[in-house]
Amino acid sequence: MASSKIMKKLLFLPLLLLVLVTSISCESKDPAVLKVFVRSSSNQLVGGAKVIIIGDQQSNPATLDFTDTSFTNSSGFSVIDMDEYFNTSGKENTTGYFDIVVKYNNKIATGYTRCRIHTTSVETIYLPN
């Protein structure tokens, strides 16, 4: 009877160890996303604003040359898929710094953000009066 309990423990421990090692070694597959909210000077969300992101090559470490453009939806935000940047920047590059330029009608606003691989970065840009 006692040997049966010992055998169960001996079988259970390696199985538990295998599950722990497997779960720890799994790489995150979450996408890298930049979500930019655009608000008016009166704090209203703005749909149809042009959002341009530009890789900051003067950052430390330097961000690769990268530019993307999108428009805010009717809810006032734009979602930019950053996996394109991280797929070309190499596995050792897990962070990028980007200038944000927002254009709406005759108004221009700027911002700055840091994006990381497998995470969602969120920024809010306010348009001037």
Image: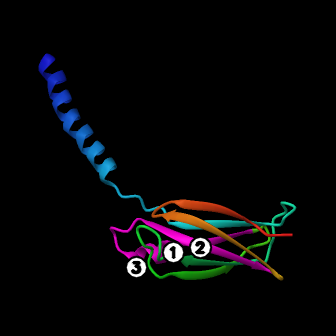
The residues colored magenta run: 77-104
Badge number at residue 88: 3
As measured in the structure, the alpha-carbon distance from the residue carrying label 2 to the one carrying label 3 is: 19 Å
Is residue 45 shown above or below 51?
Answer: above
Q: Does dot 2 land on a helix, a strand or a loop?
A: strand
- In the image, residue 66 lies at what x, y percent? 50, 81
Task: Name the residue rendered at 19%, 22% in the picture.
Answer: 5
Which badge, 2 or 3, is on the more N-terminal residue?
Answer: 3
Q: Residues within 10 Å of mark 1 (few under 14, many from 20)?
A: many
Image point (24%, 40%), residue name:
17
- The vertical placement of 12 against 67, above or below, is above
What percent of the width, then of the height, locates residue 119? 51, 60
How far from the left and from the top, in percent, is residue 60?
43, 67
Instruction: State which quarter of the image contains the C terminus.
Output: bottom right
Q: Which residue is mark 2?
A: 99
In the rendered structure, the answer to whether residue 29 lies left or right of residue 79 reads left
Locate residue 114 relative to residue 128 in the image: left or right.
left
Q: Residues within 10 Å of mark 3 (few under 14, many from 20)?
A: few
* Residue 35 in which image quadrant: bottom right
Q: To which residue does mark 1 refer?
A: 56
Q: Residue furthest top?
A: 2
Q: Is residue 1 visible?
A: no
Contact between labelled residues 1 and 2, with CB atoms less than 8 Å apart: yes
